[in-house]
Amino acid sequence: MKPSINHIQKRKKIQTILIIGLFALFLSWSLIDTGFNVPKLLNGIGETFRFIFIDMFPPNLSSLKGFMGPALDTVYMSFVAMVISAISAFFLSFIAAYNLTPHPTLQYAVRGLASFLQSIPALVWVLVLVAAYGLGLIAGTIALTLSGTGLLTRSFAEILEEIDMGPVEAVQSTGASWIQVIGQAVVPQVLPGMVGWSLYKFDLNIREAAVIGMVGGGGIGFAMQRSLSLFQYKDAFMAILLIFTLIIGIEYLTNKVRMRLL
């Protein structure tokens, strides 16, 4: 006997109440455990505005010239990491896609590797790599490359899994090899999407590079951290404005390119 409509509605109502109750319970637990309270929040906001508009404002414009070199280093590091990640992910994604992989075992292995690389943030990677390569752009570039390879491999694989299999089957029917099928029937379909994802990762790299630079990855983040450690807050504010301008500019350019490709 099928349950009545009223019974189904009642069951859904109970499930909704349970979900809301569990959400409220977890939220309350989290607020208590973190010591979150409104007075402390308001006091912190006041201190933040005081720090920005008294200690950091106005920015020291004379320090802009000294930050231009590190800012360019950040762009170079992000671009190199994006290119290496995209090339590596391009080859790995064909193995990771379930509809194109030469063998399921290879698919699972590559997907596991991509998940591992993606799950560890670039900030953590650079902390490990600084011990091996020292402070500077090399550690930052490798960190961005590792995290980027994981992200792009999974993203490219998802693009490959959504392709139209008609052209693939047509080329296979001619007796073409696996590599010939990929080159003639798959790559033309997915290349614009892959380039779009690569440009998006370049945009993300600029943001991440500013953060990993503060822990030894080089670039504008490292220069800003040095100013903060010397209590040169007005110089640091100039670096923050430069980072903001850099991110907005790169995001604008990459969005324009992606719109033309997609």
Image (spheres, rainbow, N blue to C red):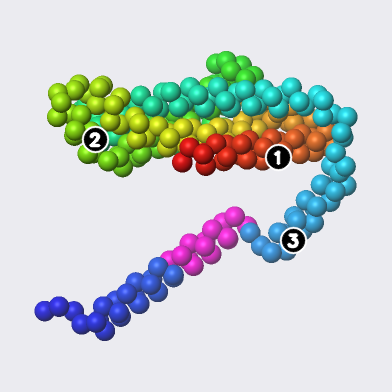
User: What is the CA distance from the residue labelled 1 to the residue labelled 3?
Assistant: 26 Å
Q: Are marks 1 and 2 in contact (CB under 8 Å)?
A: no
Task: Give how far across and how far down residue 152 sits, in percent.
Answer: 43, 33
Using the rendered view, name the quadrant where residue 79 is placed: top right
Task: Give how far across and how far down residue 89 sits, in percent.
Answer: 40, 27
**Residue at disc 2, secondary structure:** helix
| Residue wearing tag 1 | 244
Question: In percent of the image, x 59 and y 55: which residue is there?
Answer: 34
Residue 65 or 172: which is nearer the viewer? 172
Which numbered tag is attached to residue 42? Answer: 3
Q: Nearer the viewer, mark 1 or mark 3?
A: 1
* Magenta segment: 22-35
Residue 228 seen: no
**Of marks 1 and 3, which one's residue comes earlier in the chain?**
3
**Residue at disc 1, secondary structure:** helix
User: What is the CA distance from the residue labelled 2 to the residue labelled 3?
Assistant: 61 Å
| Residue wearing tag 2 | 167
| Main secondary structure of the magenta stretch | helix
